[in-house]
Image (cartoon, rainbow, N blue to C red):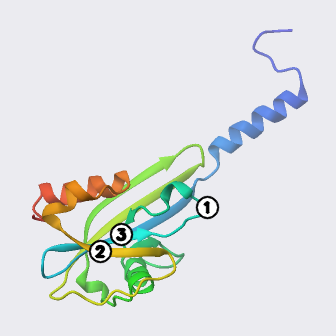
Amino acid sequence: MHANRVESPLLLGWLVFVTLRHMSKPTLEAVSKVLVVNQHNELLVLTIGEYKHRPDRSFKPDLPGGMVDPGETERDAVVRELREETGIVLSPERLDLVYAKTEFFSKENKSVSKFLYLVFLAETPEVLLSWEHAAYRWIPLSDLASSVTFRPFYDEAIQYCFSTGLLYA
């Protein structure tokens, strides 16, 4: 037997399976969230309710938004999610895309694109929470860094917004 030759059909089948698995097209997902800032320079921060599928995310800070449905634009998705999660209705034209990033998760063979939008409101709208969230609060942007820790992408995006002057304390 030569060292570089595969003798077993079973082993050869396994190698083909593993190779094809790594060559398969990854799952593509997109998530859109929005920074909602009111007339007092306060950010709307939601608190996730009990999340049985991901207990590590239960009762953690969140931003309005969520998964982009097939055939939906990222901007339309965040408008829909904002309405569903908070009752706040906005036209898509009011939102500015301020940060985006795509990450690949090799373990799941999944590529996730994340989009963060920004809107400044001239008022503080009434918030009607959906079943997904347990609470909300308006946090002054000047207190945000010391009072809230979001998931890494959103912390990174918010820091970018402050560093570029898109947000100010």
Q: Amino acid at mark 3?
A: Leu
| Crowding at mark 2 (Cα within 10 Å: few <14, some 14-19, many 20+) | few
Q: Nearer the viewer, residue 154 or 27?
A: 154
Identify residue for label 3: 63
Quarter in which the N terminus is drawn: top right
The answer to which of 30 and 44 lies nearer the viewer is 44
Left or right, residue 12 beside residue 69 = right
**Residue at figure coordinates x 72%, y 37% from the top left:** 18
- Residue 115 in the image: x percent, y percent? 35, 65
Q: Which mark is residue 90?
A: none
Q: Is residue 20 left or right of residue 45?
A: right
| Residue for badge 2 | 137
The reply, left or right, for residue 22 in relation to residue 33 is right
* Snapshot quadrant of residue 166: bottom left
x and y, in percent, of residue 14 in the image:
80, 34
Label 2: state its secondary structure: strand
Image quadrant containing the C terminus: bottom left
Find numbered disc 1 in the image and state the secondary structure of the residue it sits on.
loop
Toward the viewer: 29 or 78? 78
Residue under circle 1?
Answer: 53
